[in-house]
Amino acid sequence: MIACSLPTAKVRDFRLKAKREKVPGLHFAYRGGRNRMFSVMIVDDEPKLRLGLQTLIPWRELGFEIMGTAAGGNEALRVLGEQTPDVLLVDIRMPGMDGLQLLQEIRRRGWDVHAIVLSGYADFEYARRALQYGVEAYLLKPVNKEELAALLQKIHGQLSAKLQEKRGQQEVHSREWAVYSLLSSSHDWGSVSLDELAESLGINWMTYQVVLIAFPDLHSEEDGRIRSFRDRLAASYASDGQGVVLYFAPYTVLLLGKPPAGDLGRAELYRDLQLLSGEIRARMAAAAGETVRALPEITNSFRTARSLLERSFFFDKGKLLTSETLESYRTAASVSADASLSDGEEAAFRLYYLVDVGHTEAIHSFLEGVAAQMAISGKGETEIRERFFYLANETVRKIPPRLWPESGYPGEPAQFLAGIYGQRYIRDLVGYVAAVMERWARCADYTSRDNEMKRMLDFIDRHHHENLRLEMLAGLFNYSRSYLGQLFKNYTGEYFNAYLDRVRVEKAKELLAQGMKVYEVAEKVGYSNVNYFHNKFKKIAGRSPSSYQKNDKS
């Protein structure tokens, strides 16, 4: 460790303040690279409860490890005589020496143990006597996982603070502790000069940059591979004074004194991180905050890096994320975004139509537009995944059942839909959904429609009852609205709306002949207003719907 050379008065002031710090869950890359885990012993005469407690609580994540169990007070005393745990979970009623007698004996022998009583009896006298022996809490069975975990976190903080006091001046002045305190704003530095502190710790650099590394699919403190990664990172960047490495849940922090220069430098740093994390074999994300010129300003760099990691879903994988990455994405997204795609129902209709008309080449760009519009509107990754699930599910519900096996997709619709939530990056999400939609579009049967106008008329015939608009068809078939309108008039001899009304009236005649009521027919063929339908029908057919139905029956 590095000894501090601050003036004596300031060192004394710094130490007094540091001793009052409580930093739960704090792990440094100390000599040997080991993180301190506190020990726990479980004492209960019920085997199922002893086993259940070992599996119910994420001990390692909370900074604890089970050192042993005992079925009664006498057995526990024998173990405690050889090794004293930091925390004791003990039942009250047990054969032989019960829990209260065990606690009394522990206090008599002066063993420093944080005790938690677990009891199946809400008995005031039991609780009063337990508290006399200085227990942390009296919890009733069955144990509430959240309540016990919160209590353990509190105890971990107390144990960490006590351990910090014992480590003395050298560890109090460690670079890792100083950086952690700055990042967490957990320390009142008082009269301590941060410039002098930085000088004494060997981190009085011209510039500083915070790099955060995360393994989103792993629980950092549950996996020894991640602790080993931090050890290797410290050996590469901290041992020769290039940086400081520490754990700031849930991130590994690398504070650099010489930030990487340009795209090449950032790419080289990311490759180093990948090599050092090689044995982990899990998704890694890394982000760098802005370069700052004073030690207290590293909090700004940290916040920027954390914000970038929280939005890593939006960026390409395999790169070090920076503010430049964010600006580049925003620029690209603004080009792809389409405000008309903000409405989920509208987007679902358009995606289904693209599949239905076999417009394979437009599907990927359409989905990119949906994603970009949501991104620039400030939507998060959860909302975007949910929107893509909705779009895909609406298409699954509407496509002909034969398309699923014909598309050759190796799975069921439910598997495809569930896979949407497994996409970790927005580009992967777009590609995943687009690939399946394009399979379906290629399977659409258009052998009887040898040109686009025939495809369009067939589409209108099959979807006449929906809210069809010329501008929608123009988008589907990649025409301008005015050009498609003229093309349609030249091909059919009618304007689009007139043609659609005629198709609907012809369909209405068929339904009226089947005996359906007029208002039902109106809704079936796409008219929400029955009076409007009545007028359109009479104008095209020359008589009212009811008159047509009577004459047809006669």
Image (cartoon, rainbow, N blue to C red):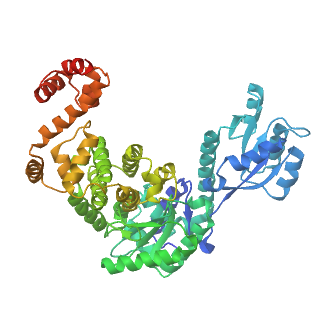
Q: Give how far across and how far down residue 410 sits, in percent.
A: 51, 59
Question: Residue placed at 30% from the left, 78% from the top?
Answer: 262
Indicate the position of residue 542 as horizontal and vertical percent values: 11, 25
Look at the image and tell me whether residue 223 can be seen. yes
Task: Count the marks.
Answer: 0
Q: Residue furthest right?
A: 96
In the image, 276: left or right of 311?
A: right
User: Can residue 307 be seen in the rendering of this structure?
Assistant: no
Which quadrant would residue 549 be assigned to in this image?
Answer: top left
Measuring 21% from the left and 19% from the top, which residue is drawn there? 551
Q: In which quarter of the image is the C terminus?
A: top left
Residue 459 position, x and y percent, is 26, 47
Judged left or right of residue 366, residue 38 is right
In the figure, residue 128 lies in which quadrant?
top right
- Nearest the viewer among 144 and 240 is 144
Q: Quadrant of residue 280?
A: bottom right
Q: Quadrant of the N terminus?
A: bottom right
- Asked whether, in this view, residue 139 is left or right of residue 103, the answer is left
Q: Residue at x 27, y 24 (%)?
A: 512
Estimate the x, y position of residue 327 in percent, counting from the top left.
26, 63
Looking at the picture, tell me which residue is in the foreground, 493 or 322. Answer: 493
Q: Is residue 45 left or right of residue 469?
A: right
